[in-house]
Image (cartoon, rainbow, N blue to C red):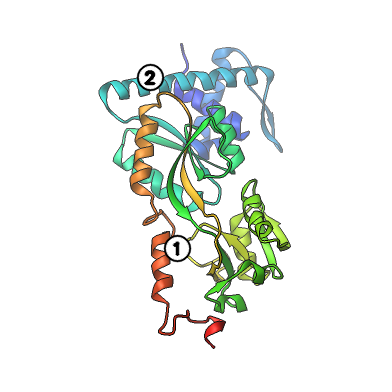
Amino acid sequence: MRYTLRQIEYFIATAETGSITLASERVNISQPSISTAIAHLEEELGTQLFIRRHAQGLSLTSAGRLLLVEAKQLIEQAEHVYSVASEVGERVRGQLSLGCFITLAPMVMPELSHSFTSTYPESRIVQTVADHEQLLERLLSAELDVAITYDLLIPDEFEFLPLASLPPHVVVSEAGPLARHSAVSLQELAREPLILLDLPISREYFLSMFMKEGLEPNIASRSTHQDVIRTMVANGYGYTLANVRPRCELALDGRRVSRVRLSGDHRPMVIGVLTLSQSRKPRLVTVFEEHCRRFVSDAYIPGMVAPVMERRTFLGQIDGDGSLPGDGSSS
């Protein structure tokens, strides 16, 4: 055999991204190294794997598509060798394919992944960011080993380990009138313009809160991008509902948003670790689950204001007459 597993990994990265530039960023190696590896594979195998289109990047040939299936199986088998060795020697090593829900990823993923690989230096984490439905699909197809997501519509073939509970709250412009309220109800919000997070299942979660109270929200705009929504809110286009609590209150354009408590009894979203149900999980997965259990809780969530700390903040704001500063009822 005159090709290496590393060359196979470079081929997979290029095939899945359709670009040597993007493949280079994914595997953190130079573009010439990627090009050389692919050229070597094509020469060794005696077939063209990619069609080069300057404007459209790379696309797989029929032979390339067949090789991609085999290449993924080859890498999976190679990783399994590490898993077996790890379990026999009680060492934690190998590659973990980790997915994360798109709104959680910017805050949770970097610190959680770094802390794990620092604790277990022979491990490596490959990160994927996606919405909830995509995470389920990729776990089922074995593209992912584990995912950090919410407890929304978990099918029976999955296991969910709860870590922390995030009640919904309202995000408003710091300069807007709602920012002066200590709390606001859905009845008060129904007539205000809503900038809706338009992701599968998340969308239904937020809209169901209005339906439960017989209300219809005034949806002014929708976006699948959390940062776009925060910037629109900061610029006064409307409010949004959210569960994540970034430590920074700045939108990407430098304007500020404010969090306002949502009054009433609303189902929280629970952050947890999602895996396929199986009789015996790989040691790397079980160790990662335990790491998450120790690292994420109501008292501490990477990149976020933890729910316990936020509850203490609300309690600390209560003044002598039992109202909160800025609450219209105290005037």
Residue at far bottom of view = 331
The mark nearer the N terminus, 2 or 1, is 2
Find out whether the residues at labels 2 and 1 contact each other: C-beta distance under 8 Å.
Answer: no
Q: Secondary structure at mark 1?
A: loop
Q: Nearer the viewer, residue 98 or 213?
A: 213
Residue 123 left/right relative to 38: left
Q: Nearer the viewer, residue 59 or 240?
A: 240
Q: Which residue is mark 1?
A: 247
Question: Can residue 176 be seen here?
Answer: no
**Residue 92 image offset from top left, x and y in percent:** 31, 31
- Crowd around label 1: few <14 · some 14–19 · many ≥20 (10 Å): few
Relative to 203, is 28 above or below? above
The amino acid type of the residue labelled 2 equals: Val
**Residue 284 image offset from top left, x and y in percent:** 37, 31
Q: Which mark is residue 168?
A: none
The amino acid type of the residue labelled 1 equals: Arg
Instruction: For the C terminus, give its image quadrant.
Output: bottom right
Q: Residue at x 59, y 78 (%)?
A: 175
Q: Residue at x 54, y 55 (%)?
A: 267
Q: Secondary structure at mark 2?
A: helix
Q: Which residue is mark 2?
A: 81
